[in-house]
Image: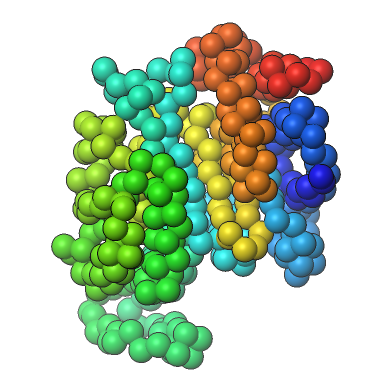
């Protein structure tokens, strides 16, 4: 069996952590009898600064030939914040319609959590973040008094939707941004969450802010109730996003699968990352179950550590395990997570986890634990 994987190392520490991830996946392939063929794509800040190009049509059509993209990180001090994030990372998520952002919040054995008296049995849930809608749709504008403003017209013609907007204001300067939630977009991510819960502990918690943003999240809540009714074996509850941050800290053991709109999902998964031991340990998958998915650590590119071989590769290696899972290599995926846990037990960890191992030491050790030559 052969799997072809596209690799985007990206910026900062991205290339060095993905390098270790590829070595680990190779070792897993050797042990479980499949071959991996990696193809690297030079996408990121360097190319942008040289050529002005973020993503080309060719990039998109080439990447579209793969079922899985292994992604490092994007972001560079030389580029204004937002350009690379929106022009590459979000553009890929949207282009490939990766509507599920899967983020396991699991405290591995041997890792310490800032939550007193909580352990691996308490912190083990999955956040299913909607990944294509909400306040990430990129509809908004800014205007200064006295100057023309035609975004609304553009928006109406592009989306053929009347948002009922009629912004009259004497403010010197005004900005707005619109969140869009659709029945179809909510339903498909919720279906994914319920399917996942049926294979786990059969509970789905929905996050929203329907008490204030009652249009967008009112629709979200209605669809959640409908999807819940179609899955009677799964227990459900609702939380407002402010409250769920409290419960994540106080009672993480309550959660099994958490389904959330895009922006709240962004916020609560950084909290989740901390309770599972830190950003260096938090993986994510951007999934289109019928298309091209993309797996990445949820942390950024940490430019100041670039090229120093000190970054923690575990989030990326774990994201590699999610990638294997998506390709149906479930045994290999759990072996990779097992090897990560073993390497932590062996004390081969980077500085952020209190150790002194380098990025490649951790990779070497995990490769050896899988039976490869580190
Ligand atoms: C994440 C990141 C991204 C997001 C940024 C970099 C666009 O914070 O993956 O959580 O907001 O989704
Ligand atoms: Mn984030």
Quadrant of the rendering where the N terminus is positioned: top right
**Residue visible at 28% across and 32% down in the picture:** 253
**Residue visible at 56% across and 55% down in the picture:** 287
**Residue visible at 61% across and 12% down in the picture:** 348
In the rendered view, would you say 142 is above or below 146?
A: above
In the rendered view, would you say 196 is above or below 322?
A: below
* 155 sits to left or right of 46: left
* 13 sits to left or right of 300: right
Quadrant of the rendering where the C terminus is positioned: top right
Residue 347 percent location from the top left of the image: 56, 9
Q: Residue furthest left?
A: 211
Residue 214 percent location from the top left of the image: 21, 69
Kindly tell me whether residue 107 is visible in this rendering.
yes
Residue 319 percent location from the top left of the image: 59, 39
* 254 sits to left or right of 107: left
Kindly tell me whether residue 14 is visible in this rendering.
no
**Residue visible at 42% across and 26% down in the picture:** 107
Return the residue nearer the eye: 199 or 248. 199
Return the residue nearer the eye: 66 or 2. 2
Residue 267 percent location from the top left of the image: 37, 47
Which of the 4 image quadrants contains residue 70? Answer: top right
In the rendered view, would you say 223 is above or below 32?
A: below
């Amino acid at each position: 069996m052969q799997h072809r994987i596209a690799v985007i190392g990206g910026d900062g520490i991205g290339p060095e952590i993905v390098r270790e991830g590829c070595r680990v996946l190779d070792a897993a392939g050797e042990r479980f009898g499949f071959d991996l063929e990696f193809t690297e794509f030079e996408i990121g800040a360097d190319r942008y600064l040289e050529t002005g190009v973020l993503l080309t049509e060719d990039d998109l059509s080439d990447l579209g030939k793969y079922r899985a993209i292994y992604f490092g990180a994007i972001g560079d001090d030389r580029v204004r914040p937002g350009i690379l994030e929106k022009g590459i990372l979000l553009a890929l998520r949207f282009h490939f319609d990766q509507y599920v952002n899967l983020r396991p919040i699991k405290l591995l054995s041997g890792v310490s959590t800032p939550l007193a008296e909580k352990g691996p049995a308490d912190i083990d849930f999955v956040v299913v973040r909607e990944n294509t809608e909400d306040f990430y749709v990129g509809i908004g504008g800014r205007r200064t008094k006295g100057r023309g403003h035609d975004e609304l017209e553009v928006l109406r013609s592009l989306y053929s939707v009347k948002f009922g907007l009629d912004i009259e204001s004497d403010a010197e300067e005004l900005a707005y941004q619109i969140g869009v939630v659709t029945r179809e977009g909510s339903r498909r991510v919720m279906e994914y969450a319920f399917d996942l819960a049926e294979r786990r502990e059969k509970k789905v918690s929905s996050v929203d802010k329907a008490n204030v943003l009652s249009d967008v999240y009112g629709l979200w809540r209605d669809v959640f109730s409908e999807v819940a009714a179609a899955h009677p074996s799964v227990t459900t509850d609702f939380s407002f996003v402010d409250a769920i941050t409290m419960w994540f800290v106080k009672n993480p053991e309550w959660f099994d699968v958490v389904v959330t709109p895009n922006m709240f999902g962004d916020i609560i998964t950084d909290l989740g990352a901390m309770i599972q031991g830190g950003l260096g340990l938090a993986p994510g998958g951007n999934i289109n179950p019928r298309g091209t998915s993309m797996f990445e650590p949820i942390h950024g590119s940490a430019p100041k550590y670039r090229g120093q071989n000190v970054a923690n590769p575990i989030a990326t290696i774990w994201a590699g395990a999610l990638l294997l899972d998506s390709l149906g290599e479930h045994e290999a995926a759990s072996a990779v997570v097992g090897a990560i846990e073993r390497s932590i037990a062996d004390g081969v960890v980077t500085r952020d986890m209190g150790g002194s191992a380098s990025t490649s030491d951790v990779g070497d050790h995990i490769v050896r634990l899988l039976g490869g030559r580190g």
